Amino acid sequence: MKQHTNGKLRAQPLPIAKSSRPEPMHNPLPVREWMHRLTLCLCLLAPGLSIADDSAPALTLHYFGTAGLSYVTSGQADFVRNLSQPNGPKGGQWSGQLDSLVGAQANFQVNEQLEIVAQAVSQHRYDDTYIPELTWAFARYLPRPDIELRGGRLGMDFYMRADSRLVGYSYLTVRPSVDYYGGLPFQYLDGLDGAVTLVVGEGLLRAKVFGGYSPEKIPFAEAQWDLSDSPMLGGNLGYQLGSWQFRLSYAQIRYTHNLPLDYAALMTTLRGIPLPGTQLAADALTIQGTTSRHYSAGVIYDEGPLQVQLMVSGAKHESAFFQDGVAGYLLTGYRVGDITPYAGLSWSRNNPATVHSTGIPALDAAVTGAIDETHSDQHTYTLGLRWDLYSGMDVKVQWDAVRGSPGSKFLYRWEQPGWTGQTHVLSAVVDFAF
Amino acid sequence: MSKILFSLLFLLMIAWTGSAQADLVLIANPAIAENTISREEAINIYMGRLRRFPSGASAQPLDLPANGTEKALFYRLLVNKELSDIDAYWARLVFSGRASPPHTVGSLQEMLERVAGETNVIGYVDRAFVDKRVRVIMELPSTGAR
């Protein structure tokens, strides 16, 4: 997920050797193929239908977007909104790329039970372009008011509020907490989900499960990491009582492909040296066929002008290449007329796994260097103002002070020597949603 | 404590604007099984969390246009939120494919006609406009603001 910018790994001469890691056990083509076809059908169907009156099927169009400008005061690393961005502004640079995006959505309400939704978004994406991506395309079926089934391309619901990360107008801050959501590059999956809502006590309990395959790519230095065909699975349990919302979530992804470039070069080197230590290290670093698990809990209190959010998460990775970690944020805002000042604190801390020594000091250093790329040890203070200008439009200004150790690299791109882990980000955005 | 404080603030606001706000009521078709619904049930229907009557029958909410005074008052009384909060709330739900906001009718007359003619919708009007064709299922008195 991270590039190796220090040149340590790239300099290795590469003995040619095939990985001995077996291919994934099964290849679930039919389901995947079916998903792709469904997605395609939905896209073709949605825009082709005309707007009708109230009781008959109805097509509605919606737009959202953000125009933003940010300035990063210092630090020799690219600041990114999340790891789906290949680069960003570093110390002393202005950028409109961090937060600017535009999305369009069509909702086709066939009847009270059935709705078809398609959404496309243009944003600074993995290949350094703004080519629009189909982020949603699904059919939503409610056999009863308390049961919801969806199939097609669905937004990633790993953490609470993760499926509305792109819609700036829907939240308080300029961007979702980078410490909390930044390490989560997954945005959507092709699959199914189902949710049931029960009245429990005075409140509502909502249980949801989802599963499918990732169709995405993640930037990795000059290349991309292919997540396609990686199965994802998860669920969450939410309880809403008056002004309180609670949610527990679990999600996992099993990677079908290894990383390219430096990672691949290191693995080839390790596999090519027939020592027990090098093979053990290669086994530990292997990504293909391993699973990452994400656990999270969130509480939101939203009453009148006051809102408070507290989220915590933990990630466990089978591959030692990705450091296990915890992250969280606390955010509060209080509306005064059209202005809502807010303040937040967020944190991200990853810890390296112990990998067996290869027996060759230079290789041990390369292995450590690779693992260090996913290290995180930082917290961020955030202060900002949201001004609700018109219905469907807001203006926000925000200051973030990132306080990290020099080894805190996971949430950045293109770290260079001299990176201290400390920077400030000043941002101003206009959000709209219609 | 905070509710009392908000109530006081709200009363002060009404006093300050100098206009006694009319009472709003939630209305449904007289053919539905319920005589009343609770505040929580009304919130669940209007906020898209669970759109059904206690009997289990589907309940689709209707909104008045935002240019009148009733809509803003309704959301203040029901969930203690301003219309821009409600807009942001719906942006989140619409763009994450969860639910759609209530359908907006053109006028108060249309609201009454829809509710009088359909058993699966609910609406809100100023109490003064209620007639025999609809049933009041919840009261939202301005003076009893939460």
Image (spheres, coloured by chain):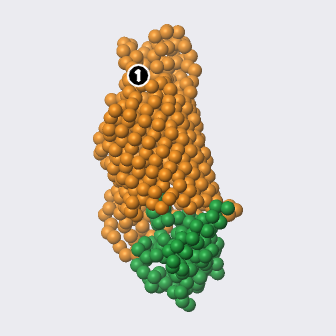
Q: List the single residue furthest toward the right.
A: A201
Between residue B105 and residue A235, name the one nearer to us.
Answer: B105
Chain coloured green here: B
Residue shown at 45% from the left, 85% from the top:
B109
Position in image of residue B77 (x %, y %): 56, 71
Position in image of residue A43 (x %, y %): 35, 56
Relative to A52, does residue A304 appear above or below in the rendering?
above
Give the amino acid at mark 1. Gly
| Residue A234 lies in quadrant | top right
Which residue is denoted by mark 1 in the rendering?
A418
Which of the chains bears the disc numbered 1?
A: A
Chain coloured orange here: A
Residue shown at 35% from the left, 47% from the top:
A68
Position in image of residue B117 (x %, y %): 49, 84
| Residue A125 lies in quadrant | top left
Kindly state the secondary structure of the residue where label 1 is placed: loop
The quarter in which the C terminus of chain A is drawn is bottom left
